[in-house]
Amino acid sequence: MLGTSKDIKYPGLNILPPGVERHVVNGGALTAFQIFPDDELEIINNDGNQICEIICFNKDGKSDVGILNLKSNNKKNFIRNILNGKDETILATNYQLKKRNLNISDSKSSIIFDPDTKAGERMKFKSKDKCFAIFAAPGDDMDITNQNPPSDLTIFIKRFKIINDKELNVIPDPVFEPLYEENINKETSISYQVKEGDYIQVISPTGRQCSDFVAFDTKKLEKGIEKGLDWQTTRTFMGNTFPGPGLHSKFYDTDHEPLVEVIRDTVGKHDTFNLACTSKYYEDAGYFGHPNCSDNLTESMSKYGVQKQKGWHAINLFFNTSAGGLNSVISDESYSRPGDYVMFKALKDLTIGTTACPSDIDPCNSWNPTNIFVRTYDKNKEFRKSFGFRMKTDSENKLTRNSGFYERTSKLTRNFVDARGFWLPNDYTKHGLVNEYNACRNDAVLIDLSSLRKFEIIGPDAEELMNYALTRNIKKLSVGQVVYSAMCYENGMA
């Protein structure tokens, strides 16, 4: 394996050696990326019993799996069917295929692994030339009598040429054609305008880099009225330290009008109660003339006629700041990882300023300011609301998913909460918590349990194992019967 958890030294740092990347192919889905001459690939069958389909396009745009020393051996071409789906990895792959003018209908694919592959089995390849490759983990619809769900594959790439061995720069592939993209060089800021309904994605390519975000109602600005985002108003209305995807997701101005809505947040930890950094902050620390976000915002926003401010009220994206005990405010290193981002939806025509924070005198940017990347999308596109979460420190970031019941439950309520990676209804409109509770006690209810962990215990000693682990006598159960039970430690504590 090219990288393991033992390589972890500091949270948020790239845990893999320079030039090594990890990609996860979700079960039933696919991923695609560019491969260069002499790059080495290792594909791991995480849970076993999962085939992997591969399609490669050479530098001339022709289908050629021989670049990875494979032979075309598949007539079904599962990838063509998967590309009809709506998962974002699928949409991003379709966008890349269109952008590169690659024709998937004429492609030939290769299958590696087979349905009897053992868990953890791996295969290695070396690229002969430059190519664009698609990797899929296809599977049939799950049959509960066979227990045949498609499972994840993990791909490690060891790049032959390491472009930058100091900083890992990850900019997620666009899902649709962007309206606007711009890199914000470290210690600077930019300004731009978006239309109502458009999406704004603010990305930290290297991780552990903070960014200040300000926004004004463009129509008010044109009338000479400056009404920007206000954290005090936002906190009062939302009842949270910072808004996040879900019911409490909006940022307001001082006129009590919402300007942006948080659609996606892959970090989940932001400070929204401090100013953008000011010249005074650095002067008080003895760094006279140090670049600061407030002066940078004043310069970049001046072209839209916004007045100069000594300190800007901003959304402090990726900042790890909180109110501590003894009436203090504490700050530490950002939680953001390479490629983490926040996505907003503009609720009005907006004039926006975004910075790459220049602070190198405290841990907020890990003492090393880096770039920020901004991308916007048209309002006619659609992104599902989601949080990012990791099962373990070194796990890949996963986004909150809609459960299989979402299509129905979303018509009954807007109040959804994130539960172990699934959006689950918190209550139902026009019913109320008391009536729902009484229904549980006196009538019958249907509950979405998608977020609960499921384990399948199989084998000749399955019943004995369950009797050993649980406090119930499993032998008394009939086939198909369900019971609750506790799993205790040897001291009797659950």
Image (cartoon, rainbow, N blue to C red):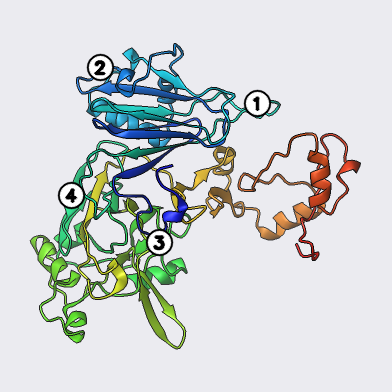
Q: Is residue 282 left or right of residue 259?
A: left
Task: Tell me the distance, in whole angstroms, between the alpha carbons under discs 2 and 1.
Answer: 37 Å
Q: Where does the image place residue 3, in percent across and percent down from the top left? A: 41, 47
Name the amino acid, label 4.
Glu
Q: Which residue is mark 3?
A: 9
| C-alpha gap between disc 2 and disc 4 | 32 Å
Pick whichever, 84 or 223, lies toward us. 84
Which residue lies at the image location 40% right of the left edge and 30% below the top edge?
124
Precedes in sequence: disc 1 or disc 3: 3
Neighbourhood count class around disc 2 (C-alpha, 10 Å): few under 14, some 14–19, many 20 upward:
some
Residue 172, placed above or below residue 329: above
**Residue 147 image-quadrant placement:** top right
What amino acid is found at the position of numbered circle 2 in the picture?
Lys
Q: CA distance from mark 2 to mark 3?
A: 43 Å
Reading the image, the residue beneath label 1 is 143
Q: Are marks 2 and 3 in contact (CB under 8 Å)?
A: no
**Residue 24 shown left or right of residue 349 in the figure:** right
Q: Label 4 crowding class (10 Å Cα cut-off): few <14, some 14-19, many 20+?
A: few
Q: Residue at x 73, y 57 (%)?
A: 437
Mark 3: which secondary structure? Answer: loop
Residue located beneath label 2 in the image: 62
Report crowding for label 1: few under 14, some 14 to 19, many 20 or more residues within 10 A (C-alpha): few
Q: Give the residue number, with chain letter if any, for mark 4.
A: 182
Q: Is residue 136 visible?
A: yes
